[in-house]
Amino acid sequence: FTAYDVINALKSTRIDKLVDHRDIILPQLAAVGIEAKIIKEETGWNVIWGPVYAKDLPAFIKGGFQKTEEMREVKFSFMQRMEMAIAWAFPISIIVALTAFLLKSSILPLIALAWTTPILTLAIFPLYSRWLTRGVVGFIVTTLIPWSILSLGLIICYISVERITLIELFKFIMISLAFILTLSIDLAGITPTYRSAMFERLKVIINNSKCSGCGICIDVCPRGCFELNKERDIVNIKEQEKCIQCGACIIQCPQDALSFKRLNGEVIPPEVIRRYRLNFTGKHTIRI
C-alpha cells in the first residue's frame, strides 16, 4: 500500500475525532513504499516506524516507541526458511511427478528428492549465507555445500538399502545437483537478508552537507547499515555490504541527503526512487 492508502484510511475513519494525538505506527518494512512526509503534509499525522515484526509491538510501545537493534533488523529464521522451502518443493515435486509419469520412471524417490533438496538447502542456509553475494565463487560454494551433504545422504542410503544400484545412485545425485543449481540461481535475491547477486550493484551515498542527523534512515533500515556520528551530528554508513538496496532510507530522508550510486558513477537521485516507487534489491533496474 502507499501513503495515499494510509491518508484515505485516516480521513474516511475520522479517527482524529476519537484520539487526542496525531501519531500513527506503521510497519517498518512499509517504509519502502510509503512516504511519511506526504502523510504529514496531507493529514498532519506523524508517522512512527514500528518494529519489523508485529510481535515486538507491545515492547516497542511500552519502551516509549523506541526500537532496539533487534526490533529494527529483518531476519531469516528457520521457520521462514522452511516456509520458503515448501513453496519451492511443491511446484518442483509436481513437475517431477509429471515428468516421471511420462517417462514411466519411479515417482516416489524423485518426489522425496524434490522435497529434500530445498528443505536441506534452506535448513543449512547459515552455513553458506556469507558467500551468497560473492559472484561466481559464491555461486559455486553455495551450490557445493548443500549438494555435498545431500550426496552424502544418498550414498548412505545406497549403502544401507541394497535395492539401490550404482546407476540409480548416480542418477539421483545428478538430479539433486540440477535441483540445487535451480535453487541457487538467485538464492540471495529471494531472501530478505541479502541483495541479489545477479543484478545491478548500487551503493548508497550520503551528502553530508544535507544530512541533519535526524536518524530516520537508521530507523527504517532493515539491515542496520547506518550509525549516528554524534560528534558531527550526521549519519555514517557503517556496513555498506549489508545493504539490500531496498531504498527505504532514501525514500524517507526528509533532507534528500541519500542517493543510489551506480558502479559507473551515475547517481540516481531520491526523486527518481520515489517517482517510480521502486526498490533496488535486484528485481528492477532503471535508466534515467
Image: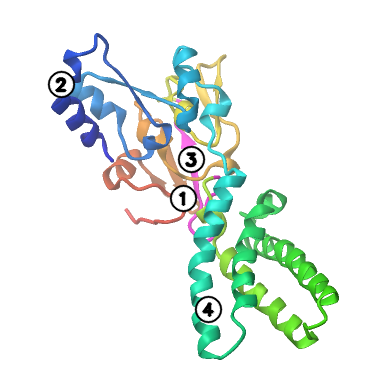
Q: Which residue is at a point 42% across and 41% down the rendered structure image? A: 247
Q: What element carries label 4?
A: helix
The type of residue carrying mark 1 is Thr
Determine contact: label 3, label 1, CB under 8 Å: no
**Which of the two labelled residues, at mark 3 and mark 1, occupies the earlier sequence position?**
3
Task: Please name which of the two marks, 1 or 2, marks the residue nearer to the observer.
Answer: 2
Task: Please name which of the two marks, 2 or 3, marks the residue nearer to the observer.
Answer: 2
Q: Mark 2 points at which residue?
A: 14
User: Is residue 199 visible in this depiction of the protein?
Assistant: yes
Q: Can residue 198 be found in the magenta stretch? A: yes
Q: Name the residue under label 1.
A: 281
Q: Name the residue under label 4.
A: 97
Q: Name the residue under label 3.
A: 204
Badge 3 density bin: few <14, some 14–19, many ≥20, Cα 10 Å: some
Q: What element carries label 1?
A: loop
Q: Which residue is at a point 36% across and 31% down the rendered structure image? A: 252
**Which of the two labelled residues, at mark 1 and mark 2, occupies the earlier sequence position?**
2
Task: Tell me how far mark 3 sits from mark 4, CA to CA.
Answer: 45 Å
